[in-house]
Amino acid sequence: MAAEPRYLGADEIRRRLPPAQARQAIAGAYLALARGELEGPVRTGLGAGAETSLIMPALSPGHIGVKVLHLRPGNPAAGRAAVVGEMLIWDRETGGLLGVIDAAALTAVRTAALAGHATRLLAPPAVRRVALLGAGGQGYDQALALVEATGAGELRIWNRTGERARALAERLGPELSGVAVTVADTAREAVADAGAVTLVTASPSPLLAAGDLAAEVHLNAMGGYRPDMAEIGPDIISGASAVLVDNVPGAQAEAGELIQAAALGHLDLSGLQDLRAVRGDRRGWTVFKSVGAAIFDLAMAERLLEA
């Protein structure tokens, strides 16, 4: 008799995959990708406007995974989460369902792990101060990943609504012992002298321009997932010493910052590379753009089942 599928909720996901282990799972996913062991198409979006449902399948040697996310921005007003959904994972050989995973929590942990992996590869050495722009549903995991990847002693948080930034700072206090967590009044103030910055917002227009940045800084643009979104300006893209993405086909189709920069002649989308292309130290600004990919969700789900 087949075993009952396991349900993994948000608390168990975070307990089994703390930031360092989640980041290592992403590094392992890139190795598997290089071996041709992970595959998945660009996700499919259903629905109109802000109320979109995203369907994301992926395949590995041992498993099949499908993640479905429903984005419902009106939910918080009724006391419900703005992002809901599940990921299902099956045994590839038998077709048996192995697990049902909270997709919102999995997405938050996976997205943060991608930013953490990129930061570890691309941030300047000895980062003392980091910044997080965006204190929404993914802010908590992104903050933990950013500090873990750099070992920074100071974290500045900015959010359009200061109350949410302060609430996140209070939540992070016990988690980040020895790290000074402060709230900035502006995005520019938050990133001043920061060696690594993560943006995780749904901003339709750039929050940062080149003049806001330190001379040596790595940026993770993690929030925008449509061509009409952009968290950083085209002048940052054009001035960067390296622009890397999580998954090339997805970025070419959905990464607003890069698509808009390409339309202005600042970037050649056909030359995009993922994090496997990182070689040696980088100077100046480096940019990592993520729109998400189900291959990384599947890698994280496999690591969860192993744990």
Image (spheres, rainbow, N blue to C red):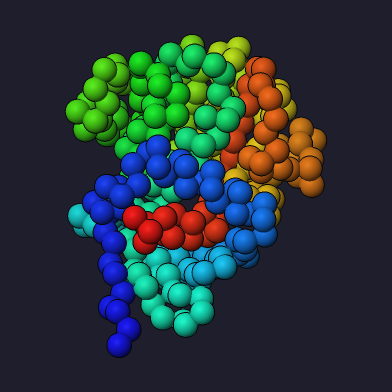
Residue at image point 59% right, 15% down: 216
Dividing the picture into quadrants, the one containing residue 82 is bottom left
Whole-percent x and y of residue 150?
Answer: 45, 24
Dividing the picture into quadrants, the one containing residue 281 is top right
- Specify the quadrant that holds the C terminus: bottom left
Q: Is there any visible trace of residue 83 in the rendered image? A: no
Q: Is residue 242 left or right of residue 289?
A: right
- Compared with 36, 176 (above or below) is above
Whole-percent x and y of residue 279?
Answer: 70, 30
Residue at image point 43% right, 13% down: 128
Residue at image point 47% right, 47% down: 25
Q: How many marks?
A: 0
Viewer-closest of 33 and 185:
33
Q: Is residue 140 left or right of residue 133?
A: left
Q: Is there any visible trace of residue 157 in the rendered image? A: yes
Whole-percent x and y of residue 303?
Answer: 42, 55
In this view, the residue farthest toward the bottom is: 1
Viewer-closest of 278 and 293:
278
Viewer-closest of 194 and 224:
194
Dividing the picture into quadrants, the one containing residue 146 is top left
Q: Is residue 229 left or right of residue 136?
A: right
Viewer-closest of 227 and 285:
285
- Compared with 164, 35 (above or below) is below
Residue at image point 38% right, 59% down: 306
- Specify the quadrant that holds the N terminus: bottom left
Whole-percent x and y of residue 227?
Answer: 61, 49
